[in-house]
Amino acid sequence: MELYSPEGLRVDGRRWNELRRFYCRINTHPIVADGSAYVEAGNTKIVCLLNGPHEPTRSQMNTQKGSLDIKLHVSPFSTTERRKVTRNDRRIQELSTILKNTFEQVVILKNYPRTIIEVNVRVLAQDGGLLAACCNAITLALVDAGIALYDYISAVSAGVFDNQILLDLNRLEEQDLSSVTIGVVGKTKKLSLVLSETRLPQDRLAKVFEVAVNGCHQLKDQMDAQVAKKGREKAITEELKTNWVQ
Amino acid sequence: MPPSTKRLNNGLSVTTKVFVRSRNGGATKIVREHYLRDDVACYSKLCDQCEYSLETTPVLSHVPFSTAKLTKHYLILDTNIVLNAIDLLEGSQALFDVIIPQTVLEEVRNRSYPIYTRLRGLSKADAKRLIVFHNEFCKNTFVARQKGETINDYNDRLIRKVGEYYNSHLSNYGVKVFLLTDDKDNLKKCKDEHILALSLREYLGQLPNSEDLLDTLPSAQDDLQVAEFKYAEYYSQSRLIAGVKSSVLFQGPMNVSSYDIFEGTINLPSIFPKPILVRGRQNMNRATNGDLVVVELLPKSQWVAPSNDIVDETTLGNADNEDNDLIISDQERRLLNKEARRAQMEDESKLQPSAKVVGVIRRRWRLFTGQLSPNTITTNTNALNSCLVTLSEKSMPAVRIKTRKANDLLNMRIVVAIDDWPGTSKHPEGHFVRTLGPIEDKDTEQEALLLEHDVEYRPFSKNVLDCLPKEGHEWIVPVDLSSDEQLKKRRDLRDKLVCSIDPPGCVDIDDALHARKLPNGNFEVGVHIADVTHFVKPATALDQEGASRSTSVYLVDKRIDMLPTLLGTDLCSLKPYVDRFSFSVIWELDEDANIINVDFMKSIIKSREAFSYQDAQDRIDDSSNNDELTQGMRSLLALSKKLKKKRMDAGALNLSSPEVKVHMDSETSDPGEVEIKKLLDTNSLVEEFMLLANISVARKIYDAFPQIAMLRRHAPPPSTNFEALNEMLHIRKGMTISVENSRALSDSLDRCVDKNDEYFNTLVRIMATRCMMAAEYFVSGNFSYQEFKHYGLAADIYTHFTSPIRRYCDVLAHRQLAAAIGYEPLHPIQRDKTKMDLIVKNMNRRHRNAQFAGRASIEYYVGQVIKNTESSQEGYIIKVFTNGIVVLVPNFGVESLIKLEDMGDESSGLFDEKEFKLSFNDKIGNKRELHVFDKVTVYMKSVLNEMTGKRKAVFLLK
């Protein structure tokens, strides 16, 4: 298969600057979690459940600010070939740490001293862009839980095929191309996350960032729309409830 | 359940593609996203509905092709048409305005990658107006696969849908779109669904030049034939794979002997120390030279020795021994394998483990040149004639083609393609592609030779030429050196007294030198190499063309350039008296030519003079001339001699090949005389410093890029290669060659001297050279440091750096060195090891082909010279067979076979294998004995071979 045909189409029929289908919902598990979200980026599917802020065990207590605990679970059925991934897998641990470092910058933790915010990210299906999808899911879960944030973090991956930059890589592309995942704060050009696990030519980097930031902004708008929609729904139900009680 | 489709915004919707892939026996379900769009353009210039982005424009013509019988039309090709008629598609006679559905492109890619690249090449060139239509991504032409539908049926349906779409899409513009397919099922379905479809034959039949065109088609499969022959059937694919996995069967490339087309060997160094032998028509079972085959060992009773006979197409025709069907279990087979291995290790007898071919994994069929065998043409009319084509390549069997033009093609050199080799046919079946010209015509032979060696000789495409500097020949080194960041990094070396020394008449000057005595008594020596990479930037069309050609090819009277002439002979060439960009290596060498210091830099130089070897020699020898330049050259010469001595002491080999040079008559450009190349001191002057530069650069780039450095290695020859030669030397002359290391080999070669015969030593060297391994390019990550060794040069690490105008390896080395010294970063494509591996593989192949082409060209011209000057010459016997000998004539550098029947009474021939002796009664009845290494006098003349159309030197023993 041609990764990028001379006619300008990618393996799955997208053009170079097109995002995959992005679908998200928040407040999916209102009973078991304080904040929850479900994100699909193409065939990558993530559920994120958030509990907190609540009192931690003594050892995790920080009197100055709240602590953030992010755990990543990869389901064995998430890849085409069934594979058990233990929590101690080095790659999983590394990704968790990266996510934690990223979100510690936008969550206003000083508002929550002596508490812990526990985030559990469950990967249901993988088709490339795992880290980016996790980021978006956590942002939505944080919003849903009503935790103070400076701004959204929206993330997307981008790669380079010969001289062509491709936005939002799927699994096939990710395997063959060098790529970078970036996370952008709000609608700014501030990067809170940059991760590249392959070699990327230095002189292309500025271009890649430009394209990826643009993609992040598109995602931010879509996430915003979902939050706003949920907010309106909630407002209506609240209104109904109060009217009913009265 | 068909997958659901979701609509996204802006004319994009998504569905899923689900398929099952089997891997390691298990089945995996794979789900992929599949986006459907409504902005896939139809690429017709007539259509005003489709939109195009900035880079793309419509291709299909306003005024499509039409004939009396056919209205204006475009064509859609099915996979079978592309695969079978790619030559026709590439030609300029038919098939214009072609639409290739993406489905077809993918299918072609899966079936044959080379054809895929050719097809893609066509879509880039404008001439044929060929486009790829991404039907699977177009909302209007995508259809979901139905349950239980085979992938072939599904693909056919997708293709038919394209036909339907195009016809309705373009219905307002009076253009019809025909689907061409040779699949009967598909044709029928088209008829049912009222889609315009034709078979290729039907279509071509309606064209004015149909007769010519139909000839070039592969023969239709449904032609019933009388089974003239029956080969054993190949094993099923699964049996082959399972067999190879469990080491019951063996897989490897078939190496057909050039003396006998039914004797091949398969080299499996990891399993068997010696090659496995495959002998006989039935055992070869349709395998041809270079094919990747699977073989099965024969029972020990059927093992044979490599033949001492000569068999070619001319001597064929006798019945082969019957294939006896023995059934052996896998268990027994494993025992047999062990036995085979042991036999090779211990057994001194000549019997070799033999095998038969049971499957062909991949054919290596390309276009072949050849000529019709006159005796196979049966009729004189223009009826369809089935005749045999003898190929120029000796290790390939004759090919059967069907043509109506047999009589026109007689005595013409033609190009044929092989399509298939069915088990019922004695010969492979092919089709005629085109005529090159009359046999023995100089241009024809040259083109045939280039084709035969797969040398790309067509002019550079516009794409490539567009990458050249706009100024053309007017380009000069910028005057203001501080204007540009990159330029500032260049060192200005225009004050150095640089000169170049090359063969007379050389226009692509790669290298120039300078030397200067330093105040401390040491020497500053600089080698300046044309800075090709300044003009050839990575990942441009120019770069890709260079990579695919990989090397310039030098024929006797023609040069096929790797890079366009503008660069090769002007802008890059280090011409005298003008400023040129160069890449310089500057050493500080002490009196004994030891390296004190080395420095690499991009620079600007101005060559003071371009010498030929002879001029340089004369200037150095002229003691009255004492200017600075001459002084410098003398220091260079003195240093080079020391370098050479050091190299020889380290064990560098002084090998020999019977190299000759053909002088051309300047007026008639007929070959005049043949001369053995002679070497001057100045030749070795240049050579020594180039070697030194290559070694220094190799070290530097290996330091900087331990994984991807472009290097060149020369593996030590396995001692088995020398066994035959050693045995001959031992028995005939009482000498031996030792091969433990290059030093020992070099010394032992020096000892091989026959007091009565000066030439004998050279002869041994020539024969030893043939036992050596070929040097090869490689990427450093693929070998350990110990294996980097260049055996012939006795260097621990080596690369090619000094001829970037004519070798691509040097271009890569330049880029890596530029990155290593921080001049400019390495392009990502060249950091990718897998891509580099592919480039290297191609480079090695092209390099070998270029050498063969050069030799073949010399051979051809020597043949022409001999034609004019029949004479008696002295020659040496270098090989003895049961029914003939091979004689080498050093004066002309040609060798040829003399068959026993031409020397004397065939029945009296007695071959003594141990003594390398052939005794027979000659024509007069005298008894004669011939040994290997014997000096003989032969009468040499040149004869045109009726079968191959090649002129060959023929010797008659005196």
Image: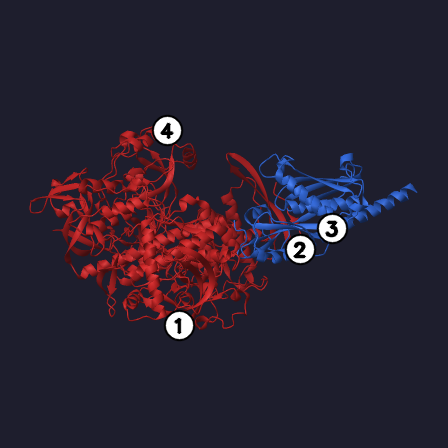
Q: Do the residues at pointers 2 and 1 share their chain?
A: no
Image position of A173 (left or right of A59): left
Per the rendering, the colour in which chain B appears is red
Residue matched to label 3: A152
Identify the amino acid type marked 4. Arg
Image position of B660 (left or right of A137): left
SS at mark 1?
A: loop
Mark 2 surroundings: few (<14), some (14-19) or many (≥20) residues within 10 A: many
Q: Position of residue A220 (x, y in %)?
A: 71, 52
Q: Nearer the viewer, mark 2 or mark 1?
A: 1
Q: Position of residue B354 (x, y in %)?
A: 30, 35
* Tag shown at residue B334: 4
SS at mark 3?
A: loop
Identify the amino acid type marked 2. Val
Per the rendering, the colour in which chain A appears is blue
Identify the amino acid type marked 3. Tyr
Q: Nearer the viewer, mark 1 or mark 3?
A: 1
Image position of A149 (left or right of B744): right
Residue furthest right in the image: A246
Residue matched to label 2: A213
Q: Are the two marked residues, 1 and 3, in contact with CB atoms closer than 8 angstroms? A: no
Ranked by sequence position, the earlier of labels 2 and 3 is 3
